[in-house]
Image (cartoon, helix red, strand yellow):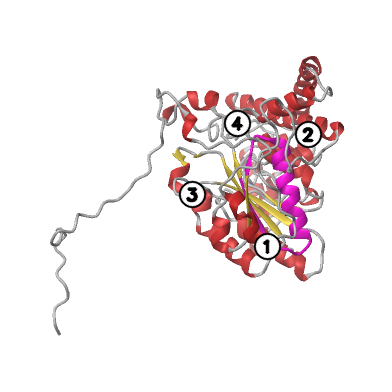
Amino acid sequence: MGEGPVRTGKPRGNLPPLELYVPEPRYRPGDTVDYSHLDIPEAGRQPRPDEACEARETWPLTTDLIRVLDDEGSAVGPWNPNLDPETLRRMLRTMALTRAFDDRMYRGQRQGKTSFYMKSTGEEAISVACAHALADDDMVFPSYRQQGILIARGYPLVDMINQIYSNRADRLKGRQLPIMYSARDYGFFTISGNLATQFPQAVGWSMASAIKGDTRIATSFIGEGSSAEGDFHAAMTFAAVYNAPVVLNIVNNQWAISSFSGFAGGERTTFAARAVGYGIAGLRVDGNDTLAVYAAMEWAANRARANLGPTLIEHFTYRAEGHSTSDDPAAYRSAQEREEWPLGDPISRLKAHLIALGEWSDDRHAEMDRELAEEVRAATKEAEKNGILGHGFHHPFHTMFEDVFEELPWHLQEQAEQAIRERQTKWPEWKE
């Protein structure tokens, strides 16, 4: 047999050597931040296609940015959902409660009451506005910064804290990492630490809903970093092929742990633009604009409910805090990024809108913050009666053998009895 081509690793002829491009964030610790490279369009200038339009009519919006609230706090343009003041106040309160909850749980982690926590500071509008735009029984397949959806749907704060503390009242019996809630009765699918798995699960659930002739749709959330996972593309393929009644959300908060959005492809085009390649509807929305987020989710949900197909939404926002309590963002990004972020803070923007309407005031807001801080404090004290991480009051020992089989097999029954017997021998004072 003849020999194949010789590969010496050297350039051939006049061809230049190949080069590999490695994305690099614009700003590192200590750098001066300048966001002038971002194209932030004027609020209200984005057209709103009919919900029954062809998917291609939405594609110009995948590289635009849907905005409703302008710099003066006014709601402008065709995407204005025209919500009544009471609904706006309720959304503002839920966002503020989510932030107060995050702050308290963050302190609890630093005090050793739990091992781990993740805040959603700066991203509250996404979860809360989406929750209000969806029906209460629509199924949510969340990532780990959508605690605002649970709070908006009325899930008890005490139960959330019990789960975070992994105490004896934890509904998940200490089997999940703190903040990975599961609440079937509230349409909140179990959070997974395996990134992007929720996307194909949401598509599959929505397909099953359609097969059964149900009326409930599904929605799912991932970060922009997770959109680089294969599960993202599998979900997009199934959603497009089967016209699944699902809304798929990419929360582009600029940073995936310590790597910036360029590593997930954010330098080439927007994340919403991926809808074009799959032939489905796509929207890109100001994630710090509560009204824009609400309007986009309402549009996409109505479209899915009318059997008009899936929608991919990119929520353009900024992770104001660290990735988690295990992360120090000062090690990899400029401290100025948060302060200079051009889309502001979602709570402050909605507050300014209500004040502009004459439906709110600084004094009422300050009083609300005091009430919410007390509400979270009271819930925390109640949960602490059930124990905190590492200080007793855990679930009964035998529960570690439960909930896998409908009937416990004989060999696990023997193991459970042996484990309990040995524990009682070692700690005679121990009682379940």
Frontmost residue, 81 versus 264: 81
Q: Is residue 342 above or below residue 400?
A: above
Tell me, yes or no, whether the highlighted magenta stretch contains residue 305: yes
Position of residue 234 relative to residue 144, above or below, is below
Residue 378 appears anywhere in the view: no
Q: How many marks?
A: 4
Q: Position of residue 4 (x, y in %)?
A: 17, 76
Give the distance between the C-alpha atoms of the residues marked 3 and 1, in whole angstroms: 22 Å
Mark sitting earlier along the chain (2/3): 2
x and y percentages locating residue 220 in the rendered image: 66, 52
Answer whether labels 4 and 2 touch (C-beta < 8 Å): no
**Other-residue count near label 1 (Cα within 10 Å), few / some / many at <14 / 14–19 / ≥20:** some
Instruction: State which region is magenta.
Output: 285-314
Disc 4 marks a residue whose amino acid type is Leu
Q: Nearer the viewer, mark 4 or mark 1?
A: 1
Label 4, on which residue?
A: 343
The span from disc 4 to disc 3 (Cα, nearest Å) is 19 Å
Residue bearing mark 3 = 269
Per the image, the residue denoted by label 2 is: 91
Q: Position of residue 76 (x, y in %)?
A: 73, 35
| Residue extending furthest toward the bottom | 1
